[in-house]
Amino acid sequence: MEKTKKIKMEKGYYLFKLEEMLNDKNISINKLMRDTNTDYKVVKRLLEGNISKIDITVLARFCDYFKCDITDIFEYFKN
C-alpha cells in the first residue's frame, strides 16, 4: 500500500504523509482516533488526501501526539 498520497493541483501538489507516520510508529487508525479524539472520517480524509479544508485544530492534535511539525503530516510543493 502507498505510504504517501500525492494530490496534484493546478500549480503544484500536496503530499499527505499521515499513513507513513502511522506505519513508522506502528500506530493503528483506531488508536490514533482514540488517543486524539478525532473522528474516523477526518482521519480517513487525511490519509487519502481527500480534503478541501484542513482543520488546524486536528493538525495541532496530531502534531502534539506525534511530537512533530505540520510538514511531517503534509506538505505543499510548487511546480
Image (cartoon, grey):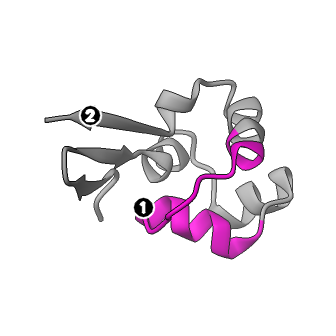
* Location of mark 2 (residue): 77
Which numbered marker is on residue 75? none
User: Percent from the top left, x then y, of residue 52?
Assistant: 50, 64
**Per the image, is 15 magenta?**
no
Question: Most extreme residue toward the bottom, as rendered?
Answer: 41
Counting other residues with Cα less than 10 Å from the Cα at mark 2, is it few (<14), some (14-19), or many (20 or more)? few
- In the picture, the quarter occupied by the C terminus is top left
Marks 2 and 1 in Cβ contact (< 8 Å): no
Identify the residue at image location x=60%, y=52%: 54
Identify the magenta region: 39-59
* Location of mark 1 (residue): 49
**Is 73 located above or below residue 46 in the figure?**
above
- For this view, does 43 lie left or right of residue 49? right
Amino acid under label 1? Answer: Gly
- For this view, does 24 lie left or right of residue 59? left
Discs 2/1, front: 2
Q: Nearer the viewer, residue 16 or 31?
A: 16
Question: Most extreme residue toward the front, as rendered?
Answer: 10
Magenta region, main secondary structure: helix
